[in-house]
Amino acid sequence: MQRAGLVVRAPAAGVLVMLVEVDRRSEDAHDLVTKLRRYWEWGRLLPKDADKCTVDLVGSRPDASERVDHQQRLWRRVYPPTAREGLVPLAFVFADTTEAKVANTVAVLEEAGRRYWASRRYGTLYEKAITARDYRQAVPVVVTTLEQLQEHGAGAAVWRRLGRTREQTLTDALDNPDGDVLYHRQYARAEAEDERRRAAEREARRPVCKRCGRKFTDQRWEETTARRTAWKAGDVSVCGTCHADDVAREEAAAEAARLQAAAPPELQGGPEPERGRGWFRRRT
């Protein structure tokens, strides 16, 4: 574990926990990158009593650790949740140096340490609609100088987040306006738009009755296409109403045939002729 020079907890100021490294130019810029890497690696560690499924998952492939929730990681046994995406925030406070040296050091941190502090694209089906960034695996890194803190105070806009160009207040620097809140909003909007598009495409495919020209209802469409019902759907080119008319006609014809078959023979051919009547005619 990389031990922090100072741990700051200021819930009232919106900073639940932050690790601080004070550099009085006693370390090379690349040494600070190494420190940043160690913080990042430590933030991804599992506790010794992690459940076997999680351990097996992490050992299954290099990127599997990213699927483990922060709650299951070692750092949550040491520090409280940060109320923001990502690992525990890290601050580099430079002292007793020149602005040029600070700028050079920060440039090295930004370039050589990008893997550890930078956000990523969200893996989503709606990549074109999502501009939000994924900070979940990043160490939020802010920088300032001891002189600025002494002159303006820690609550002033004296903090610069790596990857940003201007100084902000600490809470603004640690916040991610392009992070998960934006992501969920954009994702919901993209999903709704995709649902509308799919509904429109489905509507365009909806069959039209060849007899009356009306569109099929969902029920009739299902009847004519589902394997379990298509065999008894009748003429699959007609809508439910026309199909009902067909069924009614068929049933009426069947009923008429049944009644005809059940009628007595004398009613079918009329009264029998009186053939034997003359045999018993009385002679006069």
Image: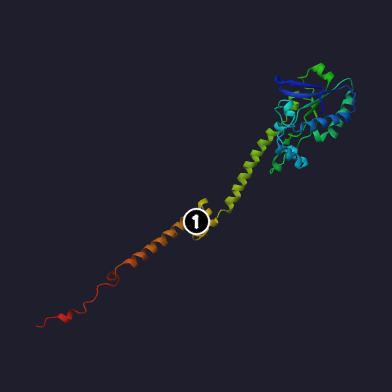
Give the residue at x 82% y 16%: 150
Provide the secondary structure element on which disc 1 rests.
loop
Give the residue at x 67% y 37%: 186
Q: Does 193 sit above or below residue 274?
A: above
Residue 178, picture quadrant: top right
Q: Quadrant of the N terminus?
A: top right
* Camera-nearest residue between 228 and 72: 72
Residue 232 picture location, percent across and down: 49, 59
Amino acid type, callout 1: Cys
The answer to whether residue 60 is left or right of residue 262 is right
Give the residue at x 47% y 58%: 243
The answer to whether residue 106 is left or right of residue 78 is right
Give the residue at x 70% y 19%: 12
Residue 63, picture quadrant: top right
Residue 48 picture location, percent across and down: 75, 32
Mark 1, residue position:
239
